Amino acid sequence: MTPSDIQQASETLRANIGTMIVGQDDAVDLLLISLLSEGHILFEGVPGVAKTLLAQAFSASLDLRFGRIQFTPDLMPGDVLGTNIYRFETNEFALTKGPIFTDLLLADEVNRTPPKTQAALLQAMHEREVTIDGKAYSLGSGFMVIATQNPIEQQGTYPLPEAQLDRFLFQHILEYPSREEERRILGLHGHRATMPSVADMGVKPVLDMAGLDAMRACIAKLPMADELLDYIVDLVRGTREHASVRVGASPRCGTMIARAARASAALDGRDYVIPDDIKRLALPALRHRLVLSPAAEIEGIKAGDVIQQLLEQVKAPR
């Protein structure tokens, strides 16, 4: 497996997803980078911009197990993880696995469930295993969370805690499509009363676990110059030193960006990382990790503004 092979496979994946999804090229790229760098992604957007549909089309393009949890205020941790149930016929407890036992997990409207249930994802997202009644169960190396949340509805929602946000490699905001894209959406789906299934739209698996493992192994070997490592460190540390930031990005964020930058290079068919790989990932990798100071919030400063300032101030290697 070479970066050229990875680039070709990614183009096939994009074309497959494109049979159902119009536009959202940045979102698809971040999904691919997350998958290849073993990260998780959080999509944020108003209703109707295809957050759930994009996750379904992406999952259907992979020959991996897919599970979905519709998060609600009454959801309990056992509804996510599963529980041990006593079997009278065998006189012993047996685990009834929850929907988290899958490869690709769509956590739909993840901010609609209380913190107690949100915490059920913490160990799974970091260690790719869960503990039930003191026993650890592996979720496999293919485990990935694709979460969605709606930014405009506050009633009945719970902000994601910083510990959980830090486990997401990226937070991507899905914007409204352009006029041309919206016109194409109507031409593709406007004659249907309900959204079609991925199978009806011709989306089919084009990558299996063996192929994914080979791609990840190739990406892990891509070299990264010391100057680029320093650049990542300076960006991450810069978030902690910025006057508008109360809590900056963690060291874990730096390691995630380094892995993701290698994946970004491979998707372009390169066997080396360049500063632009890091720059293009800085905003989605950093913005959900910054806690702004009260003064900055009063002034209307956004996390994206801070990140843009850092990209302008921190000198990139040549």
Image (cartoon, grey):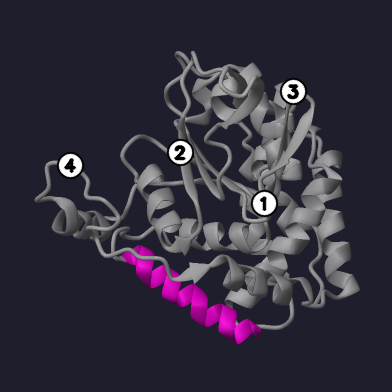
Give the residues drawn in magenta, as a range.
1-18
Q: Kindly identify which residue carries mark 3.
A: 133
Kind of residue at badge 1 = Gly
Q: Residues within 10 Å of mark 2 (few under 14, many from 20)?
A: many
Q: Kindly identify which residue carries mark 4.
A: 194
Residue 282 rendering spot, x and y as whole percentages:
68, 55
Q: CA distance from mark 1 to mark 4?
A: 34 Å
Q: Residues within 10 Å of mark 4 (few under 14, many from 20)?
A: few
Element at label 4: loop
Of callouts 2 and 1, which one flags the residue occurring earlier in the amino acid sequence? 2
Of callouts 3 and 4, which one flags the residue occurring earlier in the amino acid sequence? 3
Left or right, residue 126 beside residue 145? right
Element at label 3: loop
Of 200 and 188, nearer the camera is 200
Asked if residue 315 shows in the view, the reply is: yes
In the rendered image, which quarter contains the C terminus? bottom right
Kind of residue at badge 4 = Thr
Kind of residue at badge 2 = Arg
Residue drawn where x is 63% and y is 51% of the image: 283
Q: Kindly identify which residue carries mark 1.
A: 140
Left or right, residue 240 beside residue 128? right
Q: CA distance from mark 4 to mark 2?
A: 19 Å
In the rendered image, residue 259 lying in the magenta stretch gets the answer no
Q: Residues within 10 Å of mark 3 (few under 14, many from 20)?
A: few
Residue farthest left in this picture:
191
State if disc 4 and disc 3 touch (CB < 8 Å): no
Q: CA distance from mark 2 to mark 1?
A: 17 Å
Q: Nearer the viewer, mark 2 or mark 3?
A: 3
Residue drawn where x is 86% and y is 40% of the image: 241
